[in-house]
Image (tube, rainbow, N blue to C red):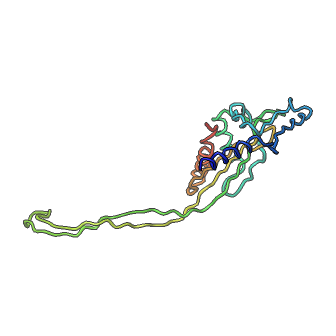
Amino acid sequence: MKRFALLLLTIGLAACQSHNPYTTDSVPLPPAPPGAANHFDRSAYPAAPRDYAAYRSWAWQQRPAGSAWATADLVQDALNNALDQRGLRPAQGNAAADIKVRTDTRLERRVRQVADSYDPYYGGGYGSFGNRGYGNGIGVGTRVPLTRSYEEEVVVVRIDFFDGRSGEQVWSGQAEMRSTGSQAERAEALRKAVSDALGEYPPA
């Protein structure tokens, strides 16, 4: 047994000392292309946050069209006032605007659902003849849900901002308000919808 183990050990040592047919070799890296040191890969880094404070002036990308519900002048006045409150002024003369504005105003119908409930009460009791209340009464109360559906007309306002230089869309907002009522009430609904659509501008 000892001779057999010694024989295996001798064979193992001989195998370790035999020539290894596998060799390692390294291939040098190819030379860098010309101008590689001066190339900056922007896709490898996140885009810098947009500086909305740099936008100070605006102009129409496309003037709004009037409709039977609201004239073009009414839409322009509502937007002009709302933008003015956010520090954006109309571009003067031939000066290039920082932002180009496009707005879309339309009427749509919405189906609303309102959930109501009422509490029927069943009970009785005995009391004296002159007593208007109930004495020793017993009763059962339950709550019965009731859902009503109705349709209403709303004015929908969408506002889009585009960078004045690149033409890239940089912001968008939308809001709606009920459009029923008199002409004055509809004009107020339009102004409120425009203000709400710009409520998140500039973004935090």
Q: Given the current orientation, which residue lies at the most extreme left position? A: 128
* Residue at the image position 64 percent from the left and 37 percent from the top: 202
Front residue (pair 159, 3) = 3
* Vertical position of residue 121 compared to residue 91: above or below: below
Q: Position of residue 145 (x, y in %)?
A: 37, 66
* Vertical position of residue 183 compared to residue 166: above or below: below
Q: Is residue 204 left or right of residue 99?
A: left
Quarter of the image with the C terminus is: top right
Q: Position of residue 163 (x, y in %)?
A: 76, 39
Disc tally is 0
Q: Given the current orientation, which residue lies at the most extreme right position? A: 34
Q: Position of residue 100 (x, y in %)?
A: 76, 41
Q: Quadrant of residue 138?
A: bottom left
* Residue at the image position 63 percent from the left and 48 percent from the top: 3
Front residue (pair 30, 60) = 30
Front residue (pair 155, 111) = 111
* Vertical position of residue 154 compared to residue 7: above or below: below
Q: Is residue 125 left or right of residue 35?
A: left
Q: Position of residue 168 (x, y in %)?
A: 77, 43
